[in-house]
Image (spheres, rainbow, N blue to C red):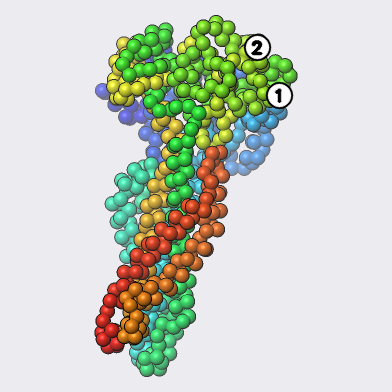
Amino acid sequence: MLTPELARKYFKGEALGKLITIGNQNKSFKVTGIAATPPHNSHFSFAALLSTSSEKEYYSAPIWLSNGLYTYFRKSSNTDIAAISSKLNDVTDKHIAPEIEKFLGASIQKFRESGNEYGYYTAPLLNSRLHTTWNDDIQAQGNITYLYVFGGVGVFILLIACINFMNLSTARSAGRAKEVGLRKTLGSIRSQMVGQFLAESFVYAFIAITIAFALALLLLPQFNLLSGKELTLANILDPTILWIAMMLVVVIGLFAGSYPAFYLTSFSAVEVLKGKVRAGLKSKGIRSGLVVFQFALSIILIICTSTVYQQITFLQERNAGMDKHSVLVINNAGRLGTNQTVFKNTILTKGGVEKASFTNNVFPGVNNTTAFRNAVTRKDHILGTYFADYDHAEVLKFELLQGRYFSRDFPSDSTAVVINEAAARELGWEQPLQEKLIVFGGDQSKGIVTETPMNVIGVVKDFNFESYKMKVRPMVIQLTDKSNNLLVRYSGKADDVVKEVTTLWKEYASGDPLEYSFLDQNFDQLFREEERLGSLFTVFTVLAIFIASLGLFALAAFTAEQRTKEIGIRKAMGASVSNVTALLSKEFTLLVVISIILAVVPAYFLLDYWLSQFAYRVEITVFIFAISSLGALAIAWFTVGYQALKAALIEPVKSLRYE
């Protein structure tokens, strides 16, 4: 079955019933149907679907360890998933365990003790999109943790905005008190006025939601680019989203408007009309508390954003034990067939190409593990392994710690291996070059198992061959002369090398398209999610600081206005502009300092939790907290300082005539 896009690409007219050749096996398949293109948020995507009955030879092998399929099943409503899982465990014990012992030379208990696992596990399909707990799902899925993170950040920003509304409403309470007193005198009851103030809050919230939807639609392409998602207009205008938006209007309206509404309507009509009501100490204390809270949230975001970028930079610049730069990866070199050797030799004659190496594995990731036996202790160890040719170490520039790498000068290297430091530690070897590893071989389908002693000829420095979230595993490199992938180290321009390789590929690959990538970009994909996290955190942090600063700016203006007479008197008594500016700034500086103190502990625990998923991570230092705190103070000083300086520059005569 083909998707409409693929059908149009290969067939001008009707595709049903036509034949299409896939791969280089010259095997044709009949198009029996056109399948709708899976949506972007589908569990997995495809362009063509093949029936397993078309590949009986591959899928009917009587080897339980030969498992290259994902199985989907629909259970009946009254079936207990625990019962299914129990039966799957029975299948593992009955069929998998004997084959692990037979072909890998280790019991399933030993296999598991070595940090490996093999079995059948169930997961609800609807949950797999965000709750996948394994790395080799059929397709890369989302991460519920990051959804919670950004949901939490969104709530933070909403809280900061609501706090601004509450702060400014209570700060202006004296101004609206006369309105409350007059309406009470004319017969209005408190519930009516509470309703009015809440209605105002709901109107503001509704206008804000409307503007938010407009901005979301306008900025959708930029958001998709930043987040790596493919959200559409339909996603934003989904009925569920609209209902949530309406609920937000109610919640935000109540949260932001309730305190000002009840506070403003609590004034006595007599006191108001006599002009005795001013924003008192109680409301000032509440405003100060809210400022502390919103700046604490902003500082947490600043600290987290700084550390995320610090971790990303650390991973990018960390010595991975190999030089992953300037390496072109031909991912389908197996398509060359018998032309592999001549293709490699011809590439080496091209300008800008330094070395080339065949390997059955492309980093990052090594999915092949097998049992090796210590020739002396006869103890089995489950170790990672892959195959590479003589030039592999020069292409990747491994750091050799002991011995040597494979060499054409030593024919006996066909029965030799090179290991990494982690493998030497796992095997308990202090002098690895004097040791041997036994490799199991034979014909699995016939149940024939052989043992081949392999000399350890070299030890390379541990190199990262998979995610930085995992410690380097024990690894054994075995020799091969050709394989499915070709690594090409170049010194010239990447575009020039790709052109040369593409030209040669067309000559030797019998019409198959060239599939290539760059090794450094492959590794960059490992922390692409973290880079997006950093970018989104930056946007949200800037937004949070901007909103908090707006509130602080308005509150500083109100405070300066309230203290106009005091400022005039102080200046008349000889106070300088700097004295007055410092006086007005001191109060807000103290609030920000309190915010910093309150932000330190939650920021530390949040960062420690996030960094705990990395095997290689930066340390959480005082420096990052100090820089972030100074940044927050600088923003606050700039925000408040403008209003303080403006008030300090007013002539004393004008200040004393105020009111």
Identified by mark 1, the residue type is Ser
Q: Is residue 304 above or below residue 199?
A: above
| Residue 456 position in % (x across, y down) | 61, 16
Identify the mark at residue 453; answer none if there is no mark: 2
Q: Quadrant of the C terminus?
A: bottom left
| Residue 2 position in % (x across, y down) | 37, 26
| Residue 198 position in % (x across, y down) | 40, 74
Q: Quadrant of the N terminus?
A: top left
Q: Is residue 132 above or below residue 208?
A: above
Q: What is the C-alpha distance between the residues marked 2 and 1?
A: 21 Å
Front position among marks 2 and 1? 2
* Left or right: residue 355 compared with residue 449: left
The local secondary structure at tag 1 comes to loop
**Do we see residue 189 in this rendering?**
no
Q: Is residue 215 above or below residue 59?
A: below
Q: Please give the residue where the numbered disc 1 appears in the rendered image.
A: 107
- Asked whether disc 2 touches disc 1, contact meaning CB atoms under 8 Å apart, the reply is no
The local secondary structure at tag 2 comes to strand
Q: Quadrant of residue 229?
A: top left
The residue sitting at 39% across, 47% down in the picture is 535
Whichever of callouts 2 and 1 sits on the residue coming sooner in the sequence is 1
Q: Quadrant of residue 347?
A: top left
The residue sitting at 39% across, 19% down in the picture is 488
| Residue 327 position in % (x across, y down) | 40, 24
Identified by mark 2, the residue type is Pro
Residue 566 or 502: which is nearer the viewer?
566
The residue carrying pointer 2 sits among few (fewer than 14), some (14 to 19) or many (20 or more) residues within 10 Å by Cα, namely: some
* Left or right: residue 439 compared with residue 179: right
- Outermost front residue: 574
Q: Quadrant of residue 95?
A: top right
